[in-house]
Image (spheres, rainbow, N blue to C red):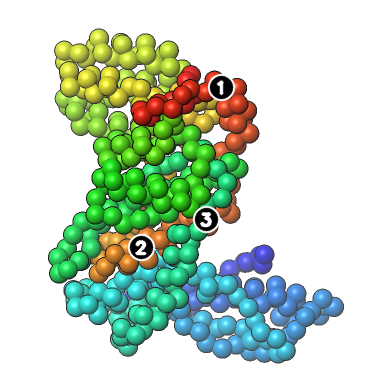
Amino acid sequence: MAQLQITLDEQLLHQLFLGDSKESGMNALLEAILDQVLQAQASEQLKAEKYERSEARTDYRNGSYPHQLTTRVGKLSLNVPRLRNGHFSTDLFKRYQRSEQALVLSLMEMVINGVSTRRVSHITEELCGTDFSKSTVSDLCGHLDPLVHGWNDRPLEGSYPFLFVDAIYTKVRENGRVRSRGVLISYGVNEKGYRMILGLKVDDSESTEAWKNYFDWLKSRGLKGVDVIVSDDHGGLVGAVQKAFQGATWQRCQAHFLRNVNDRFPDDLQREGAEQVKAILHAPDIETARTLLQSFLDTYQEKASKVTEMVEEAFDDVTAVLSLPEPYRRRLRTTNGMERLNEEFRRREQVIRIFPNRESIIRLMGSVLMEQDEKWSNGRRYLRMDDYFDWKAKQPKVANSSKVTAIYPG
């Protein structure tokens, strides 16, 4: 990989920090950086720097040609190197963030479908110029959509012992009306310990049937080996988990649960009460957790009966990770990783507000998820799984039942 040492001249810095327009300064900065990236890639391909004498040299530079790249800060004019006897190749444009392309396409569709505001029209003109039409949108979708759908429907290889599930709601225009639709998402930790995003579906609601269809779809693509499912306590989701993954462990998201606890506590008891609940959740073992639970119930039974009832009822589900080896508990307590994915989607959704159709939701959300999936697969291992499989092999199996319970009791 080419090593980059980015240099910025005095004129560029003046434009960035003291210029009349922050946008023009950012454009100039990105152009300078990306031009240097392209030059570094050319040096790597040629196996020689500019004017360098080298026996390993494979070709010579032959000037450059202009190339425009559309981003959210406007159009960038880049200088792509030419080679004398060959063709310079770069993945910079191919790997240019698909989510940014999808965002632009969604805005263009809104304008074409006549549901744009002045703000959206202005943004679209800044991003794409004024010359776009239905055929332009169709052509761009023809390049991006097959990539997103191919990734979203890809076979799932290997096993996924840990599964994280969530849904996010967004607005879409259908049949002349604005409707709220659920985007069902999941990611798994595979047997090698890497996180992988498994796919998304857009549905009318978060009903048990919708989630059951989602899980059946994942299974049809090869999902198997699920031991632990982590999610929020949504009735439709929990019901589908019980049907689709009998015998697996369901871990109720502790972060969501603590927020629910805080909402029910009287203000004067909220801080100290929440700390005691957190102590239950972070107990070193299930016996200690039960002891702390009893102490909590004794303290707040009369002061906050609704809270104690909720905590007692949810105890088994929110402490399910205590049946697992300690190194795996912290990663499996919450769906916080899923929350961060949702934030990435929301950041782009704020620009659009209302999607023109369901396909544009899949295009944008799918692109966001694809990018994150690539980062995870090329990044650090999320969990070391050897110890987990060794521990699992020593656990007594229990018969499947209609209730989702710990498959390996602690």
* Towards the viewer: 206 or 387: 206
Three-letter amino acid code of the residue under disc 1? Gln
In the image, what residue occupies the spot 25% across and 80% down?
112
Q: Position of residue 276 (x, y in %)?
A: 32, 19
> In the drawing, what numbered circle is on residue 395?
1
Q: Earlier along the polypeptide chain: callout 3 or callout 1?
A: 3
| Residue at 70 percent of width and 75 percent of height | 45
Residue that carries the numbered disc 2 in the rendered image: 362
Which label number is shown at residue 155?
3
Residue at the far right in the pictured view: 55
What residue sits 18% from the left and 59% below the top? 179
Quadrant that contains the N terminus = bottom right
Query: Where in the figure is residue 335, as x and y percent of width and height?
Result: 39, 40
Q: Position of residue 9 (x, y in %)?
A: 54, 75
| Badge 1 density bin: few <14, some 14–19, many ≥20, Cα 10 Å | few
In 3D space, how far apart are the residues under numbered discs 3 and 1 (Cα atoms)? 30 Å
Q: CA distance from mark 2 to mark 1?
A: 41 Å
Per the image, label 3 sits on a secondary structure element best described as loop
Category of crowding for the residue at label 3, using alpha-carbon neighbours closer than 10 angstroms: few (below 14), some (14–19), many (at least 20): some
Q: Secondary structure at mark 1?
A: loop
Q: Secondary structure at mark 2?
A: helix
Disc on the earlier residue, 2 or 3:
3
Q: Nearer the viewer, residue 67 or 137?
A: 137
Q: Is residue 208 placed above or below 90 in the rendered structure?
A: above
